[in-house]
Image (cartoon, rainbow, N blue to C red):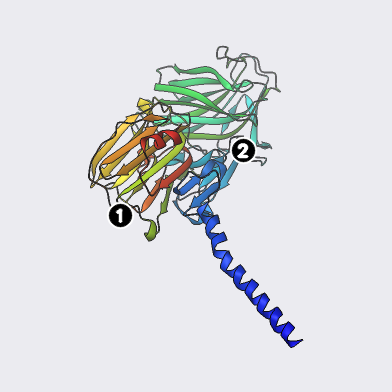
Amino acid sequence: MIRLVVLFITVWAGIVVALAGAAPPILQQTLQNPPSWVFPNAYLDFDFAHQRYWVNGQNVAIDSLLTVIRNIARTCTNSAGAINYVPINRVCINDLGLLVWGGTSNLILQSQFAASWTATRSTLTANAVTSPDATTDAATLVEDSTAANTHLAVQSVTKAASSLAYTFSVYGKSNATRRIDLQIDDNAGNGAIMSCDLAGQQVGVAAAGVGTPFTGLASGVQTWSNGWTRCYISGTSSTATTIRGVIFLDNGTGTGAVNTSYNGNGTSGATIFGAQLEQNTFIVPSPYEPTTVAANSAESDDVSYTFPLSAQLPTPGYSLYGEGYSQLPTTFPTSTYYLADIDDGSNNNRLSATHIASATTGNCAFAVTGSFILNASGGSFLSGANGKIACSATTGLQLGAVNNTALTGTTSSSMPTSLTKLHIGERPDANPLTLWNGYVNRVAVFLNALSQSALNNITQ
């Protein structure tokens, strides 16, 4: 009996030891074989659009890895148009990707129409309808029965006595019985107006001047599947010290001419939400910033990841991939917008994947001690459309590709050192003029230099 017990213990101990010895290879195999979505040999792969993240052989939680600096909550709008609010120092990530935007300031008070607005020959009722943020904080603007006249809501804002660029935007519900027209003016009959066809979710009439017209006029819409349309108009003001945001009800339909003076019936109107007046040159509206009794200002998004000391990019070679789309139009000034950047914490030593909106190209910029070694642009990369950029650097060869188009490489023997940071949608100085101003879908870093064919393959 004793022998049987001893034999059992011996056999069981052997099984335990065998299992213990087998565990490390199983674990190692798991870590060395990434999920199929991860780029082959990627050290880091942040797939923001699908909310899956990989670093050094492991799936990771992104919130614990990113350093985010932003002093105010940010609205976060997904592909369906639903608005959520993310707190300070947190990123907006949804099915569109990671939002990175420059500083914004909404000058309009009571952006959800609770007060501060003057309704003329109309009734403005706040907190009447469910809005894109799923709460009952959208308003209705309903005309009275006055004949042959306008029906509107307006708010005036004091400005400097200079010609300044402004963008005025309002959300409207697509089942409204009237179009809405947005006007920016100086309260003296000079400015610009556009018509927004909410039923068709389109620009009814493009921005046109009124009186002595504002300059640099533009208009557009952002459409959402939940029936809301964000309409906007932009232009550079006169030197008057007042700028007004005006919302007219319009009796026209579709793309017919502006018709703001008509016989009101006392019941027709529109559902509106989220008015925003901002001083900027973006042309398109920034992410919506709600206001109550004061203007609301948000600093630029500052998003970065710090490589652990063991993974600082090796001098022999490394590669960077970025995918995303900027929301700024092609007509925006010639600034370069940063999709992704690996650097030493400064602009002196870095490898950057960028977009040049005015030239509709992508760019790989490779700098050593402040001087560019590779700064090659090419490929078709349109604003408002998804684009892919991949850049590779090793001693003696620097390469790039944009949407499966090879860039002209260089053969410099210089390499930057101490690359410890990944900046996403920006460069190290977080210059607001160079922020991505859109969504970053995906970023990946490789601890080796990729070939030209590999760069083309991952950007196709």
Q: Residue furthest top?
A: 257
Other residues around mark 1 within 10 Å, as few (<14) / some (14–19) / many (≥20): some
**Can you give x and y, in whole percent of width and height, for residue 220 in the image?**
50, 24
**Can you give x and y, in whole percent of width and height, for residue 160 in the image?**
36, 34
Q: Could you say which disc has been placed on residue 418 in the image?
A: 1
Q: What kind of residue is marked 2? A: Ala
Q: Which residue is mark 2?
A: 82
Can residue 173 be seen in this snapshot?
yes
**Can you give x and y, in whole percent of width and height, for residue 338 in the image?**
38, 39
Image quadrant where residue 132 sits: top right
Q: CA distance from mark 2 to mark 1?
A: 42 Å
Identified at 38% across, 60% down, the residue is: 310
Identified at 39% across, 43% down, the residue is: 320
Label 1 residue SS = loop
**Can you give x and y, in whole percent of width and height, for residue 41 in the image?**
45, 47
Q: Residue furthest bottom?
A: 2
As rendered, which of 125 and 174 lies closer to the eye? Answer: 174
N-term-proximal mark, 2 vs 1:
2
Q: In the displayed structure, would residue 62 be above or below residue 215?
A: below
Q: In the displayed structure, would residue 32 be above or below residue 129?
A: below
> Which part of the image, by quadrant, shows the N terminus?
bottom right
Q: Could you say which disc has been placed on residue 251 in the image?
A: none
